[in-house]
Image (cartoon, rainbow, N blue to C red):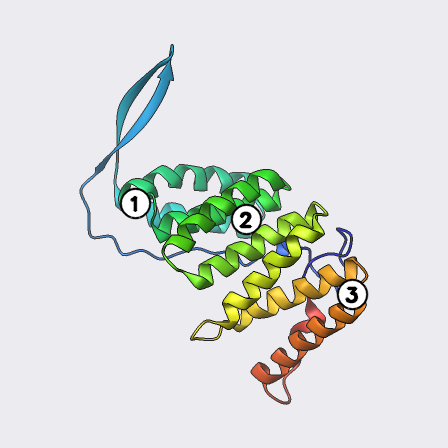
Amino acid sequence: MLPHNNYPIGNGALCAVLSLVIRGFMMKLSLRMPVLLLVFLFTSGFVVATEIAFDPQEIPPLNERALLAHQQGDYRQAARLYQQLLPMVAQHFGEQSRERALILSSLADTQLSLRQYLQAEEYYQAALVILQAIADGRGQAIVLNGLAASLYLRRQYGKAEPLFKQALELLEQLPAPDVQNRLLVLDNLASLYKTIRRNNLAEEYQSRANLLRQVTQGPGQPADSQSR
Protein backbone atom coordinates (compact mmCIF):
# COMPACT_ATOMS: atom_id res chain seq x y z
CA MET A 1 0.00 0.00 0.00
CA LEU A 2 1.16 3.50 -0.66
CA PRO A 3 1.91 5.94 2.14
CA HIS A 4 -0.30 8.94 2.89
CA ASN A 5 1.84 12.00 2.15
CA ASN A 6 4.90 9.71 2.08
CA TYR A 7 4.34 8.25 5.54
CA PRO A 8 2.80 4.89 6.43
CA ILE A 9 -0.88 5.07 7.28
CA GLY A 10 -3.53 2.87 8.83
CA ASN A 11 -2.88 -0.72 9.95
CA GLY A 12 0.86 -0.44 9.45
CA ALA A 13 0.58 0.28 5.75
CA LEU A 14 3.85 -0.06 3.90
CA CYS A 15 5.19 2.54 1.54
CA ALA A 16 5.34 1.66 -2.12
CA VAL A 17 9.06 0.96 -2.14
CA LEU A 18 8.43 -1.87 0.34
CA SER A 19 5.16 -3.22 -1.02
CA LEU A 20 6.35 -3.56 -4.60
CA VAL A 21 6.72 -7.19 -5.60
CA ILE A 22 10.37 -8.06 -6.12
CA ARG A 23 10.63 -9.99 -9.33
CA GLY A 24 13.25 -12.49 -10.35
CA PHE A 25 13.08 -14.88 -13.25
CA MET A 26 14.20 -18.42 -13.97
CA MET A 27 15.95 -19.15 -17.25
CA LYS A 28 16.93 -22.37 -19.00
CA LEU A 29 20.03 -21.75 -21.05
CA SER A 30 21.09 -24.15 -23.76
CA LEU A 31 24.20 -22.25 -24.81
CA ARG A 32 27.17 -23.34 -22.71
CA MET A 33 30.03 -21.85 -24.69
CA PRO A 34 31.23 -18.38 -23.71
CA VAL A 35 29.67 -15.50 -25.61
CA LEU A 36 31.62 -12.47 -26.77
CA LEU A 37 30.04 -9.27 -25.53
CA LEU A 38 30.87 -6.05 -27.35
CA VAL A 39 31.62 -3.16 -25.03
CA PHE A 40 32.00 0.24 -26.67
CA LEU A 41 34.62 2.51 -25.16
CA PHE A 42 34.56 6.21 -25.95
CA THR A 43 38.15 7.44 -26.18
CA SER A 44 39.22 10.78 -27.63
CA GLY A 45 36.03 11.01 -29.65
CA PHE A 46 36.39 7.54 -31.16
CA VAL A 47 34.31 4.46 -30.46
CA VAL A 48 36.41 1.36 -29.81
CA ALA A 49 34.74 -2.04 -29.61
CA THR A 50 36.22 -4.37 -27.01
CA GLU A 51 35.19 -8.02 -26.78
CA ILE A 52 34.55 -9.44 -23.32
CA ALA A 53 33.83 -13.14 -23.00
CA PHE A 54 31.07 -14.24 -20.65
CA ASP A 55 29.32 -17.53 -20.05
CA PRO A 56 25.50 -17.38 -20.28
CA GLN A 57 25.40 -19.79 -17.35
CA GLU A 58 26.52 -16.85 -15.21
CA ILE A 59 23.22 -15.05 -15.75
CA PRO A 60 20.85 -17.02 -13.43
CA PRO A 61 23.11 -16.99 -10.33
CA LEU A 62 23.92 -13.33 -10.88
CA ASN A 63 20.20 -12.59 -11.04
CA GLU A 64 19.65 -14.56 -7.83
CA ARG A 65 22.38 -12.55 -6.10
CA ALA A 66 20.72 -9.31 -7.20
CA LEU A 67 17.32 -10.52 -6.02
CA LEU A 68 18.73 -11.57 -2.64
CA ALA A 69 20.52 -8.24 -2.21
CA HIS A 70 17.25 -6.40 -2.84
CA GLN A 71 15.34 -8.63 -0.42
CA GLN A 72 17.98 -7.95 2.24
CA GLY A 73 17.74 -4.20 1.71
CA ASP A 74 21.14 -3.80 0.04
CA TYR A 75 19.69 -1.78 -2.82
CA ARG A 76 22.97 -0.32 -4.05
CA GLN A 77 24.48 -3.77 -4.42
CA ALA A 78 21.32 -4.99 -6.15
CA ALA A 79 21.50 -2.07 -8.56
CA ARG A 80 25.15 -2.82 -9.35
CA LEU A 81 24.34 -6.45 -10.08
CA TYR A 82 21.37 -5.59 -12.29
CA GLN A 83 23.55 -3.11 -14.17
CA GLN A 84 26.06 -5.90 -14.70
CA LEU A 85 23.30 -8.18 -15.94
CA LEU A 86 21.81 -5.77 -18.47
CA PRO A 87 24.37 -6.10 -21.29
CA MET A 88 24.67 -9.86 -20.74
CA VAL A 89 20.91 -10.38 -20.97
CA ALA A 90 20.63 -8.09 -23.99
CA GLN A 91 23.40 -9.99 -25.77
CA HIS A 92 22.01 -13.46 -24.99
CA PHE A 93 18.25 -12.92 -25.14
CA GLY A 94 17.98 -9.79 -27.29
CA GLU A 95 17.44 -6.07 -26.77
CA GLN A 96 13.66 -6.47 -27.06
CA SER A 97 13.36 -9.63 -24.98
CA ARG A 98 11.10 -10.16 -22.00
CA GLU A 99 14.17 -11.09 -19.97
CA ARG A 100 15.75 -7.70 -20.59
CA ALA A 101 12.47 -5.99 -19.66
CA LEU A 102 12.43 -7.90 -16.37
CA ILE A 103 15.96 -6.79 -15.54
CA LEU A 104 15.09 -3.18 -16.40
CA SER A 105 12.02 -3.42 -14.18
CA SER A 106 14.01 -4.92 -11.31
CA LEU A 107 16.63 -2.19 -11.71
CA ALA A 108 13.83 0.37 -11.57
CA ASP A 109 12.60 -1.22 -8.33
CA THR A 110 16.04 -0.79 -6.76
CA GLN A 111 16.17 2.86 -7.81
CA LEU A 112 12.71 3.38 -6.33
CA SER A 113 13.90 1.85 -3.07
CA LEU A 114 16.86 4.24 -3.14
CA ARG A 115 14.46 7.15 -3.74
CA GLN A 116 16.08 7.84 -7.09
CA TYR A 117 12.68 8.43 -8.59
CA LEU A 118 13.63 9.93 -11.95
CA GLN A 119 16.06 7.11 -12.66
CA ALA A 120 13.45 4.57 -11.60
CA GLU A 121 10.92 6.09 -13.98
CA GLU A 122 13.41 6.00 -16.83
CA TYR A 123 13.98 2.27 -16.33
CA TYR A 124 10.27 1.57 -15.92
CA GLN A 125 9.55 3.38 -19.18
CA ALA A 126 12.23 1.40 -21.01
CA ALA A 127 10.80 -1.87 -19.67
CA LEU A 128 7.27 -0.81 -20.57
CA VAL A 129 8.17 -0.20 -24.22
CA ILE A 130 9.44 -3.77 -24.53
CA LEU A 131 6.50 -5.33 -22.69
CA GLN A 132 4.01 -3.43 -24.83
CA ALA A 133 5.78 -4.61 -27.99
CA ILE A 134 5.52 -8.26 -26.93
CA ALA A 135 1.97 -7.86 -25.55
CA ASP A 136 2.83 -8.98 -22.01
CA GLY A 137 -0.20 -7.67 -20.15
CA ARG A 138 0.82 -8.84 -16.70
CA GLY A 139 4.33 -7.45 -17.10
CA GLN A 140 2.92 -4.13 -18.26
CA ALA A 141 0.64 -3.95 -15.23
CA ILE A 142 3.48 -4.60 -12.79
CA VAL A 143 5.68 -1.97 -14.42
CA LEU A 144 2.83 0.56 -14.59
CA ASN A 145 2.21 0.06 -10.87
CA GLY A 146 5.87 0.75 -10.15
CA LEU A 147 5.92 3.79 -12.41
CA ALA A 148 2.76 5.13 -10.78
CA ALA A 149 4.22 4.51 -7.31
CA SER A 150 7.27 6.58 -8.21
CA LEU A 151 5.09 9.41 -9.48
CA TYR A 152 2.98 9.21 -6.33
CA LEU A 153 6.07 9.50 -4.16
CA ARG A 154 7.01 12.63 -6.12
CA ARG A 155 3.51 13.94 -5.39
CA GLN A 156 2.57 13.75 -9.06
CA TYR A 157 -0.84 12.43 -8.14
CA GLY A 158 -2.58 13.42 -11.37
CA LYS A 159 -0.02 11.45 -13.38
CA ALA A 160 -0.04 8.46 -11.05
CA GLU A 161 -3.82 7.98 -11.03
CA PRO A 162 -4.34 6.92 -14.70
CA LEU A 163 -1.34 4.58 -14.56
CA PHE A 164 -2.70 2.77 -11.50
CA LYS A 165 -6.05 2.46 -13.28
CA GLN A 166 -4.40 1.17 -16.45
CA ALA A 167 -2.49 -1.40 -14.40
CA LEU A 168 -5.70 -2.56 -12.74
CA GLU A 169 -7.50 -2.84 -16.08
CA LEU A 170 -4.70 -4.97 -17.53
CA LEU A 171 -4.73 -7.26 -14.50
CA GLU A 172 -8.50 -7.68 -14.69
CA GLN A 173 -8.20 -8.71 -18.35
CA LEU A 174 -5.76 -11.55 -17.69
CA PRO A 175 -7.14 -15.02 -18.44
CA ALA A 176 -5.66 -16.33 -15.17
CA PRO A 177 -6.34 -14.20 -12.08
CA ASP A 178 -3.38 -12.43 -10.49
CA VAL A 179 -4.89 -11.71 -7.10
CA GLN A 180 -1.70 -10.53 -5.40
CA ASN A 181 -1.01 -7.75 -7.87
CA ARG A 182 -4.69 -6.79 -8.16
CA LEU A 183 -4.81 -6.32 -4.39
CA LEU A 184 -1.64 -4.26 -4.50
CA VAL A 185 -3.00 -1.90 -7.15
CA LEU A 186 -6.40 -1.63 -5.45
CA ASP A 187 -4.71 -0.72 -2.17
CA ASN A 188 -2.51 1.79 -3.96
CA LEU A 189 -5.51 3.44 -5.58
CA ALA A 190 -7.26 3.61 -2.21
CA SER A 191 -4.19 5.28 -0.69
CA LEU A 192 -3.90 7.69 -3.60
CA TYR A 193 -7.49 8.85 -3.27
CA LYS A 194 -7.15 9.14 0.49
CA THR A 195 -4.10 11.35 -0.01
CA ILE A 196 -5.95 13.70 -2.36
CA ARG A 197 -9.02 13.64 -0.09
CA ARG A 198 -11.35 11.92 -2.51
CA ASN A 199 -12.70 9.80 0.28
CA ASN A 200 -15.60 8.25 -1.61
CA LEU A 201 -13.24 6.77 -4.19
CA ALA A 202 -10.79 5.75 -1.48
CA GLU A 203 -13.54 3.80 0.27
CA GLU A 204 -14.69 2.27 -3.02
CA TYR A 205 -11.28 0.85 -3.91
CA GLN A 206 -10.57 -0.25 -0.35
CA SER A 207 -13.91 -2.07 -0.29
CA ARG A 208 -13.05 -3.78 -3.57
CA ALA A 209 -9.71 -4.87 -2.13
CA ASN A 210 -11.31 -6.18 1.06
CA LEU A 211 -13.96 -8.08 -0.90
CA LEU A 212 -11.33 -9.66 -3.14
CA ARG A 213 -9.41 -10.78 -0.06
CA GLN A 214 -12.53 -12.34 1.43
CA VAL A 215 -13.43 -14.15 -1.79
CA THR A 216 -9.94 -15.51 -2.40
CA GLN A 217 -9.16 -16.43 1.20
CA GLY A 218 -12.49 -18.02 1.96
CA PRO A 219 -14.47 -17.91 5.22
CA GLY A 220 -12.71 -18.38 8.51
CA GLN A 221 -9.31 -17.22 7.31
CA PRO A 222 -7.80 -14.03 8.73
CA ALA A 223 -7.66 -11.10 6.35
CA ASP A 224 -4.15 -9.92 5.57
CA SER A 225 -5.26 -6.33 5.17
CA GLN A 226 -4.47 -5.71 8.82
CA SER A 227 -0.84 -6.58 8.30
CA ARG A 228 -0.20 -4.19 5.44
Q: Position of residue 190 (x, y in %)?
A: 71, 66
Residue ranking furthest to the top:
44
Q: Please state which of the two labelled residues, at mark 2 or mark 1, is closer to the viewer.
A: 1
In the displayed image of the protein, which residue is found farthest to the bottom?
Answer: 219
Q: Residue at x 57, y 57 (%)?
A: 145
The residue under the point 69% across, 71% down is 205
Disc 2 marks a residue whose amino acid type is: Asp
* Image-based side of 199 in relation to 177, left or right: right
Residue at image location 66% in from the left, 76% down from the top: 208
To which residue does mark 3 refer? 10
Q: Name above or below for residue 54 compared with residue 99.
A: above
Secondary structure beneath label 1? loop
Q: Which residue bears the numbered disc 1?
A: 94
Q: Name the secondary structure under disc 2.
A: helix
Residue 155, horizontal then vertical, whole percent: 73, 47
Q: CA distance from mark 2 to mark 1?
A: 21 Å
Say whether residue 190 is left or right of residue 215.
right
